[in-house]
């Protein structure tokens, strides 16, 4: 295995040295990346601006694009009249939002209509195992059977063939590697596959060599071409395809054109992909998730459904990667009778690429900082509400007084970290010892000893587990799997302690059952950018655990996050209406942030372990059982306890899917590595529930990471 990895690394290094890397010219940038959305005539005779303002630094451009679909507008009371952004701010935003590359999904797409043009102008995307070079046979591979990670190369070529009898013109030919979070319109379960509600392009890499641009550049370090020579008619000796698209921008009849491309999956995203909140986890590559219905033709959706991976995503949401080639031209040039000339997609080809990145470890200090940040954010929101209430209650005393905007920026929230740290400690109090327990996950309840005539509190009982993050190996779906699942990679040992405080000899409870579940949580925003990072501690707040016993996981999240933030949103909007926006001056972004958390959609999938085992140690040695009542109680001053290990194998989870006889959990369900983006979150945890004789339940929820 080591030899194979070293061989692959050597090949990757060789190919990276082979691919050229240069600063593109202003004309290249204007004709590809920044081409405006409005249809206009091009003039390359004008002098370019100074190069210091060119925002591209390599021949393969990587950019973060935010779609207009994901932006909000002030049209209702809940948006309230904020000041309009300055012209400078608008110009900066429009740099990307008014380009074709950012809005390609909004263009009229002839490939999704009855137009014959896409079949006449046929595009095919081919993926190869090595860098393509003219004169050599390409080593083609099937990307639908592959998974890519950071640092992997995606090589290949695009062919374009005009099957008509006439030349067909174009304005642009794009070859891109994209990563997109997409949320489709969903009205009562009726999903409109052609109407996206959110399009968040977190990755957009344009191969300037494969795309048409106003220049001719050496693609490989071994090339030695003339940048002013368009190489008209140059062919690949291997198959006689034409390698140059030409200066005249048209495809000749019955001629096949070929363009080579190479992409490298980046280690992480650009920092400005989360420029609103600057959250670290939002700049990490997310895993492919869900089924990208929007990129599929309606006629092919049914046939492609069988290839979909059961990764427990929302039906209307997907995180997808793909290599795409599009030919874009003006509607009137293709004979389309539209009131106003506009750009349209004449033809396209999309090759899905499955990306499952290596998981970046989350250290204890990172988790603590995320929790403090979340607590500080909520504190900043309640501060705004308190200020508004004060103004409303003392309107006359504060008449004409304007407050400084209350902001949700990093500096404001970081000032509240100490508040968050103190609040967190309050949640970890052990009522028996009055000490802070930052190092355990713990559920404490009053244990009621019932008799025929009455019930009374006889003691306090707790279930705890050391605070740690458990992990299992990522298991590929069966179609991508190259070896059998090793039980060691998907097994866990969880130490637990059941403790009865202030116990009398007759008050020891009897355990009725122990249930263990795998919980897969998915969050999704349908409009606003998610303003915080999530951890297990935010999902399940310890001071709320005593009331969570009978609630579903979804109800727990709603009670903990969604419902309070929805209430805060309404309170802020009501106060602004009463006090006045000019007086209260709430920060625009703060309002959008709390509104986002109040409207998050959540989906929690639960899988019960069909079997588990318990091990323990007592005075006579080690023991093993499946019945917790057989583990002896150990005396500790005025309390008794049971300390034991819970052994789990995720292959023993009930997948809830009827599969072939003998199939196991990972044959039916795929757990992708945890990820967070500006519009989605995926987390996992283990839920352990112990039900006692008199109906009381103890529950602890333990973080689980899926690691590749």
Image: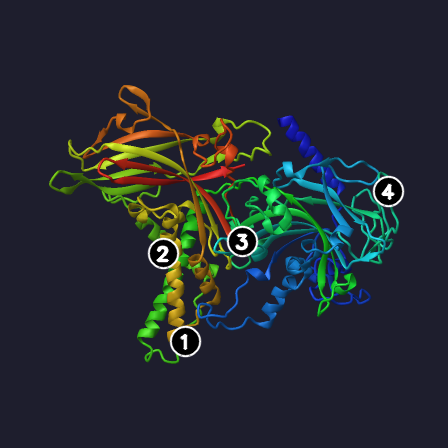
The image shows residue 17 at horizontal and vertical percentages of 74, 40
Tell me which numbered mark, 4 or 2, is placed earlier along the sequence.
4
Question: Which of the 4 image quarters holds residue 44?
Answer: bottom right
Circle 4: is it few (<14), some (14-19), or many (20+) Cα within 10 Å? Answer: some
Between 358 and 166, which is closer to the camera in this rendering?
Answer: 166
Mark number, residue 567: none
The image shows residue 539 at horizontal and vertical percentages of 40, 48
Question: Which of the 4 image quarters holds residue 495?
Answer: top left
Between 332 and 568, which is closer to the camera in this rendering?
Answer: 332
The image shows residue 324 at horizontal and vertical percentages of 69, 49
Mark number, residue 580: 1
Disc 4 on helix, strand or loop?
Answer: loop
Which quadrant is the N terminus positioned in? top right
Which residue is painted at 46% across and 54% down in the image? Answer: 532
- Work out how far the residue at label 4 is from the one at label 3, CA to CA, in angstroms: 45 Å
Q: Is residue 137 above or below residue 234?
A: above
Write down the residue under mark 4.
240
- Work out how far the residue at label 4 is from the one at label 2, CA to CA, in angstroms: 70 Å
Residues at discs 2 and 1 in contact (Cβ within 8 Å):
no
Residue 292 is left or right of residue 416, and the answer is: right
* Count of numbered circles on the image: 4
Please tell me whether mark 4 or mark 2 is closer to you in this view.
Answer: 4
Q: Is residue 708 above or below residue 243?
A: above
Write down the residue under mark 3.
191
Please tell me whether mark 4 or mark 3 is closer to you in this view.
Answer: 3
Please tell me whether mark 2 or mark 3 is closer to you in this view.
Answer: 3
Which residue is painted at 75% across and 39% down in the image? Answer: 131
Write down the residue under mark 2.
419
Circle 1: is it few (<14), some (14-19), or many (20+) Cα within 10 Å? Answer: some
Between 470 and 514, which is closer to the camera in this rendering?
Answer: 514
């Amino acid at each position: 295995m080591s030899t194979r990895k070293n061989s692959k690394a050597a090949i990757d290094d060789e190919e990276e040295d082979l691919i050229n890397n240069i600063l593109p010219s202003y004309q290249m940038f204007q004709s590809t990346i920044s081409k405006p959305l409005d249809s206009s005539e091009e003039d390359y005779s004008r002098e370019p601006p100074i190069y210091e303002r060119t925002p591209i630094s390599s021949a393969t451009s990587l950019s973060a694009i935010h779609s207009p679909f994901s932006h909000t507008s002030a049209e209702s009371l809940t948006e309230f009249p904020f000041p309009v952004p300055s012209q400078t701010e608008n110009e900066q935003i429009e740099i990307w939002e008014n380009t074709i590359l950012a809005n390609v999904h909004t263009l009229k797409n002839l490939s999704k209509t009855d137009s014959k043009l896409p079949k006449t102008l046929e595009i095919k995307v081919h993926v190869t195992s090595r860098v393509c070079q003219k004169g050599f046979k390409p080593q083609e591979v099937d990307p639908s059977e592959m998974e890519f990670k950071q640092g992997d190369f995606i090589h290949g070529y695009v062919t374009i063939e005009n099957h008509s009898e006439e030349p067909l013109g174009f304005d642009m030919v794009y070859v891109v590697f994209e990563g997109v979070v997409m949320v489709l319109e969903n009205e009562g379960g009726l999903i409109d596959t052609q109407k996206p509600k959110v399009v968040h392009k977190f990755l957009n890499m344009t191969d300037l060599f494969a795309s048409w641009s106003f220049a001719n550049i050496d693609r490989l370090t071994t090339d030695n071409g003339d940048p002013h020579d368009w190489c008209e008619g140059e062919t690949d000796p291997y198959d006689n395809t034409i390698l140059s698209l030409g200066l005249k921008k048209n495809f000749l009849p019955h001629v096949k054109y070929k363009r080579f491309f190479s992409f490298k999956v980046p280690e992480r995203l650009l920092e400005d992909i989360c420029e609103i909140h600057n959250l670290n986890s939002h700049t990490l590559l997310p895993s492919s998730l869900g089924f990208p219905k929007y990129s599929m033709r309606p006629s092919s959706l049914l046939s492609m459904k069988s290839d979909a991976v059961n990764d427990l995503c929302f039906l209307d949401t997907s995180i997808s990667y793909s290599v795409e080639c599009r030919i874009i031209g003006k509607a009137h040039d293709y004979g389309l009778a539209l009131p106003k000339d506009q750009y349209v997609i004449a033809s396209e080809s999309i090759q899905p690429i499955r990306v499952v990145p290596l998981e970046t470890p989350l250290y204890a200090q990172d988790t603590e900082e995320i929790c403090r940040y979340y607590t500080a954010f909520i504190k900043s929101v309640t501060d705004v509400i308190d200020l508004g209430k004060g103004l409303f209650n003392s309107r006359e005393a504060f008449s004409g007084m304007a407050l400084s905007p209350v902001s949700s920026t990093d500096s404001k929230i970081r000032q509240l970290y100490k508040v968050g740290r103190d609040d967190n400690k309050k949640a970890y109090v052990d009522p028996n010892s009055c000490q802070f327990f930052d190092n355990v996950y713990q559920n404490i309840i009053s244990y009621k000893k019932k008799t025929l005539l009455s019930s009374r509190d006889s003691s306090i009982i707790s279930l705890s587990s050391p605070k740690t993050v458990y992990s299992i190996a990522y298991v590929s779906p069966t179609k991508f799997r190259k070896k059998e699942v090793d039980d060691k990679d998907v097994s866990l040992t969880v130490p637990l302690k059941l403790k009865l405080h202030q116990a009398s000899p007759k008050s020891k409870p009897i355990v009725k059952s122990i249930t263990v579940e795998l919980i897969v949580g998915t969050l999704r925003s349908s409009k606003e950018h998610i303003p915080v990072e999530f951890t297990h501690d935010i999902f399940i707040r310890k001071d709320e655990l005593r009331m969570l016993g009978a609630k579903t996981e979804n109800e727990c999240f709603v009670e903990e996050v969604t419902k309070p933030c929805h209430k805060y949103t309404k309170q802020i909007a009501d106060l602004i209406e009463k006090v006045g926006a000019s007086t209260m001056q709430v920060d625009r972004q703060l309002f959008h942030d709390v509104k986002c958390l109040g409207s998050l959609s959540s989906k929690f999938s639960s899988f019960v372990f069909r079997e588990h085992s318990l091990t323990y140690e007592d005075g006579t040695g080690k023991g093993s059982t499946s019945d917790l009542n057989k583990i002896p109680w150990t005396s500790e001053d005025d309390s008794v306890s049971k300390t034991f290990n819970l052994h789990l194998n995720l292959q023993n989870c009930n997948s809830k899917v009827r599969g072939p006889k003998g199939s196991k959990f990972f044959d039916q369900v795929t757990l992708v590595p945890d990820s967070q983006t500006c519009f989605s979150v995926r987390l996992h945890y283990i839920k352990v529930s112990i039900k006692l004789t008199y109906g009381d339940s103890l529950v602890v929820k333990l973080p689980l990471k899926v690691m590749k």
